[in-house]
Structure formats: C-alpha cells, structure tokens
Image (cartoon, helix red, strand yellow):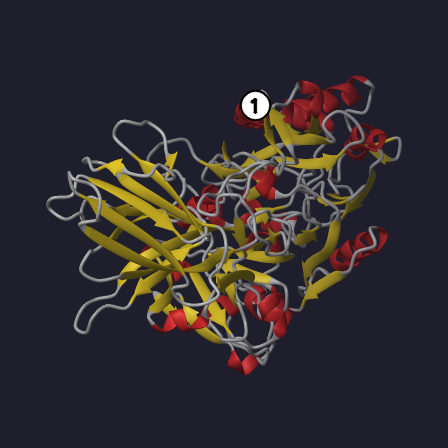
C-alpha cells in the first residue's frame, strides 16, 4: 500500500513541503477553503500528477475537470515521478470560487520539492544490496520468499581481542565488516533541502540489544567506522553528503533467536521536518526494513567431516592414534586438545556441539558451548573461537544435570514426514517422562534449540540411562538408498537373538571380554542363564522401543530405515542403565568410515560374533567398520568413542531461508 501524507493548505500564505518519490500526498482542499467557496479548481506544473477523489465518485479521476464542487470528503491526491532540480521547483495552485463563479474568492499555493529516500538491504537474498519492488517491511520464508538476513557476529576476527566481535562496539578489521550485512540509505534530490529536514535512522527499543550498526561516512579507513546504533543508541541522525547519494551502514546481529526474541529486527528511516523554535520535529515520511537473524544450525553424522577433535589423556594414546588413523582415511585434519587445556576432561562430545550460521553473503562455523563446564569449559572459547569461527553458549543458572551435556544433543539427516519437509533434519534431545525427580535438559538450552525454528526438536526418553544421553542408544550412518541414511538403534533383543543363535550352533562356552585383564569372562551360556540381566534388558528394550516408535513418527521412518545393533545394558547402583559391554551405536562417523567401540564379544571361529553381525549390517551400505578399543580409557568411565570425539562437518547445501518451518 502506498504511503500517504495529509497536507494542510492555506489561502493566507504559500505552503512548502517535501514529496518523497513513491508516496502520495493528500491535499486538504476543504480545510483551506474560504467560508463562501462552493467549488474549486486545481492545477499543477508539468512534474505533478493530480487526481480528485469526490463523494460522487468511487474512483480517482484526473483533475482535468475545470471545477469541482466542495463537499465533505473531497480530496486532491498528488504524485510525482521525477526528482526536483531545485527546492520548490514544482507547484500546485488551488483556486476557490463562490456561487457567482467568475473571479476566485481565494487561492492556495503549494511549493513542492521532490526527493528520493530509500532504505535498502539484501531483500532478494542474492548476496548484494539492490533496489527491489519486494516489500521490505515483511520477511517471508520459502524459495519464493524475501527478506534480509543478519549473522550474529560471534567470531573473533582479531586474535588479540578478548571477546567475540558481537560483544564490542569497534571495528577491528575489514574481515569483521565482511561478517555484517549492508544496509544502504539512498538520498537523492536538492541537497539544500536537508537543512530544513532531518533524516533519522532508528531501531525499536525492543530490538536495540539484538543488533549493532556501524557507519564510516565517506571514508573506508577502519578508524572512521563508528558504532551508531544498537544497545543504548536508539537513533542516529544521518547527514547526507553533498557528493554522495548513498550512505552504507554495516549491521551485525548480537543475539540468536531465543525466548522472547523471534529473530526479527526492524530498522526505520524517518524524514523529520524542523519546526519553529521550541517545538518538536514532526515526521513526514518513514520506511522500514526487516531483517531476520540467522539461526544456529546443527549438522548430522551423515554430513561430510571437515575436522575431527579428540582429547589427549594419560591413558588414551592408542585411542587418539586410532582416531587419527580414521581421520587420515577420511582425509580430514585431526585436532588434539592437550591435557593442559582439557584438564583431565576427555568428553569433548559432551562439552561442545559444532554447527554454523549462514547468510547469502557468508557462512561460518559456530561452536555451541554446553553449560556442563567441567575441565574443557575454557577450550571452546580460548582455542576454537577465532577468525570466521563463532562461539555461542547458554548457562543453566539453577544447576546442570548430565542431560545438559551435548552427547544428549543430536540431529537427524533431512527427512520428509507425512508430506512436511525438514530439509535440515530434526534436533533430537533426551528428556524424562513427567515424574518427580526426572532429569531434563536445562530450560535455557532447550529454549535456544527450539527458538532456531529450522530443525524442529524432538524430545526422546533418555532418563532411563545412568548418563542419560541419546547417543547411548541411537546414531545415524549414510546409506546409498532409500532416505540416504539408516538409523541405528541399540537392541537388547538383537543381542539375545544373536547369542541364542551361537548357543544353538554349539558356541555356548564362548566368552566375552577375552584379552581384557581383570574383567570377568562371561560365557554366552552364563549370559543367557542370567534372569536378572534378562529382565533388566527387557526393560531397556521397552525404553528403546518407545523411542523407536517416536522416531518413526517424528522422522517419517519405516522399519526398513532402521538397523538394530546388538547391545546389552546392565543396572547401575541407582537402577539406571549403563552399557554392559562397549556401546557400539556410540560410534564415530566420518563419511563411509565408522569408528565403532570394540565390544569384546564372544569369539566364534576366531572372530567376535558381535563385530561380525555389525559388519554384516553396515558393510552392504558401503561402510567400513573399524573397531576401536576404548574399554579402559572410556567404557569403564561410562562413555565410548562418540563421547570422546567430536566432528565439525560441512554445512547443508540447502539454504535455511528456503524452507517453511
């Protein structure tokens, strides 16, 4: 809808005003009419288009009609198509006539200066700012949608800086500017007009702490870029240059979508008319541009690996070497967090989750730091945060539980569920049934994940496990067919079925944990005869089956999309579950290369029957299985290969703004 402004006229003195291209002026012809006037005639100079809206007509009519009767509701509408060359170079004259006609009983003169004011951003999401007919004041999802996008400037482009770039109000490098989105204010027309009118760039109070705006004037020198908007600065007076029609502002996001913040922020430019002394300025034109802050996006196991992380400990040299060999096969670098930095904390999967942010002009990785804050708590901030590598964290002011560790945070590959597409997958988090004492993910973390919108989270039941993480009973691996992946679920039933088969084949005396010093060597016969163990695993299977049904519904899966990985669970002292032998679904996935906890299962024909069964399930998918001994370095500490590693992965090819949440 065209922006319209009402203009009051006078027969006592001329009126002057500014016309902004693309708007419409409504002239109050009745309000300025002399008392005895009954009709009027309106005419303008060639640059002015005039229309009359009269009570007897339902549409606008050209003003070429010689005279119009004055009646309540009659108005003259005015538009212009070209810029003025000088102040007041276009005119409108309204002549009023009495009953006798003939000589006018009064005249009102309006002097017009046509200018152009436009606040633009990358509305079309092409990566550059351009003029568009799209509505800048709305933000629409989807491949045919539009609306500008901001990145949270949460990296640290200056290695000497002490904080991420979104926590300061200075520009330290040109790469810092490249993280920001441009917003361009165009002002065209006679420059002297701006001595009587002021341009104000402003942001709503509710949005001010979510954005920062920098402006360098006509200079490209870094030191000239000043923080002009955001935080406590709600407005900035723009002084159009005599020699430049464009003012380029750089906009950064300061905060991700979260509780009370949808991610949408609005900027306004307003033209203010300078009043007589002692009076406030009055707005005569305003334009709004809406941005959406880009969400933090997780990547699934099936995405290509870019970098593998592992911690060095006093007893895991062989484990680190095995992970390094896998990374070499996958042709991605290995980063080892040294003992001095991890401070005896080897659970790097629990401390951080790698994701990314994306706008049309730039994409960069962002590490999400969990609130668990154990030995690794300083590692992501001190060693990962850097140029084009962002950082975000959430705290749990009321305390944390194990469910706040990020082994309890996974994401599925892309899925379609009953016709609804989730092209970036769905986040999976573990929780409890609503009961007294049940553990849940901290509200701050959970709310952050839900607020990102593009990977609609699914809550699973993980509180039955002692550690309570979803990665203890599920994983995803790439596949060449169907949906492009398989969901792997830990399965006590599959393990009992396998052991029963081997018992019937005559291998009942084959024992587990061969080669592990100090670990009881339980035979297949002993395991199958242990009724307490069987009953406990019936319970574990019911918990996993409940999650299976929920995953099938939430991810649109069929049984053929799921593979059951043999696994048994034992009861901890508090009756919660822990892996009876190394938990094979807790694996490292690097493309087609899988690093699987070595289960030390019964040897049948010289081969571990558990490893053989897993190979038979996964190798037909083109995957290679490497079984890594993590028994003493991780398993006995209630974790496995996935818990002790982390992977930064390639972002989705799909652009998040093309989806419809």
Could you tell me which quadrant the N terminus lies in?
A: top left
Residue 361 sits above or below residue 144 on the image? below
Depth check: give the residue in front, 11 or 221: 11
How many C-alpha atoms fall within 10 Å of the one at disc 1: few (<14), some, or many (≥20)? some
Residue 192 lies, in percent from the top left, at: 41, 73
x 28%, y 57%: residue: 109
- Residue 654 occupies quadrant: top right
Depth check: give the residue in front, 137 or 25: 25
Depth check: give the residue in front, 290 or 518: 290
- Mark 1, residue position: 545
Secondary structure found at label 1: helix
567 sits to left or right of 437: right
Residue 105 lies, in percent from the top left, at: 17, 50
235 sits to left or right of 225: left
- Residue 127 occupies quadrant: bottom right
Residue 215 lies, in percent from the top left, at: 49, 72
Depth check: give the residue in front, 123 or 573: 123
- Residue 161 occupies quadrant: bottom right
In the rendered image, the residue lying farthest to the right is 605
């Amino acid at each position: 809808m065209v922006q319209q402004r009402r203009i009051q006229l006078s027969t006592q003195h001329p009126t002057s005003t500014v016309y902004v291209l693309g708007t419409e002026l409504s002239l109050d012809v009745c309000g300025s009419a002399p008392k005895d006037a009954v009709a009027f005639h309106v005419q303008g100079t060639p640059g002015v288009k005039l229309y009359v809206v009269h009570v007897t007509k339902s549409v606008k009519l050209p003003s070429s009609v010689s005279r119009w009767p004055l009646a309540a509701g009659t108005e003259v509408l005015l538009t212009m198509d070209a810029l003025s060359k000088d102040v007041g170079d276009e005119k409108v004259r309204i002549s009023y006539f009495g009953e006798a006609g003939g000589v006018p009983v009064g005249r009102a003169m309006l002097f017009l200066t046509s200018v152009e004011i436009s606040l633009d951003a990358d509305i079309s999401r092409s990566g550059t700012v351009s003029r568009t007919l799209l509505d800048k004041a709305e933000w629409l999802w989807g491949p045919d949608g539009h609306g500008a996008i901001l990145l949270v400037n949460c990296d640290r482009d200056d290695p000497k800086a002490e904080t991420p770039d979104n926590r300061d109000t200075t520009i330290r490098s040109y790469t810092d500017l490249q993280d920001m989105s441009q917003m361009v204010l165009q002002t065209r027309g006679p420059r002297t007009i701006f001595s009587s009118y002021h341009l104000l760039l402003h942001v709503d109070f509710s949005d001010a702490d979510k954005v920062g705006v920098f402006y360098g004037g006509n200079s490209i020198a870094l030191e000239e870029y000043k923080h002009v908007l955001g935080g406590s600065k709600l407005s900035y007076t723009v002084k159009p240059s005599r020699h430049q029609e464009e003012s380029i502002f750089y906009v950064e996001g300061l905060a991700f979508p979260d509780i009370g913040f949808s991610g949408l922020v609005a900027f306004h430019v307003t033209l203010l008319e300078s009043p007589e002394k002692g009076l406030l300025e009055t707005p005569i034109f305003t334009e709004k541009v809406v941005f959406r802050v880009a969400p933090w996006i997780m990547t699934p196991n099936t995405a290509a690996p870019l970098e593998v992380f592992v911690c060095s400990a006093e007893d895991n040299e062989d484990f680190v070497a095995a992970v390094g060999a896998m990374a070499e096969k996958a042709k991605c670098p290995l980063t080892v967090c040294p003992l001095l930095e991890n401070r005896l904390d080897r659970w790097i999967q629990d401390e951080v989750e790698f994701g990314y942010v994306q706008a049309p002009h730039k994409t960069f990785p962002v590490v999400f730091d969990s609130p668990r804050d154990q030995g690794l708590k300083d590692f992501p901030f001190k060693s990962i945060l850097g140029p084009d590598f962002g950082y975000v964290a959430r705290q749990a002011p009321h305390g944390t539980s194990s469910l706040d560790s990020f082994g309890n945070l996974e994401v599925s590959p892309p899925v379609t569920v009953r016709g609804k597409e989730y092209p970036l997958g769905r986040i999976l988090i573990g929780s409890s049934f609503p009961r007294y004492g049940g553990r849940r993910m901290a509200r701050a973390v959970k709310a952050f994940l839900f607020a990102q919108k593009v990977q609609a989270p699914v809550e699973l039941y993980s509180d039955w496990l002692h550690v309570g993480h979803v990665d203890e009973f599920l994983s995803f691996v790439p596949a060449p067919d169907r949906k492009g992946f398989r969901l792997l679920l830990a399965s006590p039933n599959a393990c009992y079925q396998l052991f029963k088969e081997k018992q019937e084949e005559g291998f009942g005396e084959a024992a587990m944990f061969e080669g592990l010093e100090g670990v009881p060597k339980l035979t297949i016969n002993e395991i199958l005869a242990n009724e307490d163990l069987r009953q406990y695993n019936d319970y574990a299977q019911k918990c996993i089956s409940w999650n299976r049904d929920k995953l099938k519904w939430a991810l649109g899966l069929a049984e053929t999309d799921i593979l059951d990985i043999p696994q048994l669970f034992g009861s901890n002292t508090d009756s919660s579950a822990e892996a009876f032998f190394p938990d094979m679904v807790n694996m490292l996935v690097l493309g087609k290369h899988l690093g699987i906890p070595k289960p030390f299962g019964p040897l049948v024909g010289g081969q571990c029957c558990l490893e053989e069964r897993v190979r038979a399930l996964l190798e037909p998918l083109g995957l290679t299985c490497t079984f890594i001994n993590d028994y003493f370095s991780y398993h006995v500490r209630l974790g496995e290969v996935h818990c002790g590693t982390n992977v930064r992965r390639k972002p989705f090819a799909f652009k998040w703004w093309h989806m419809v949440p």
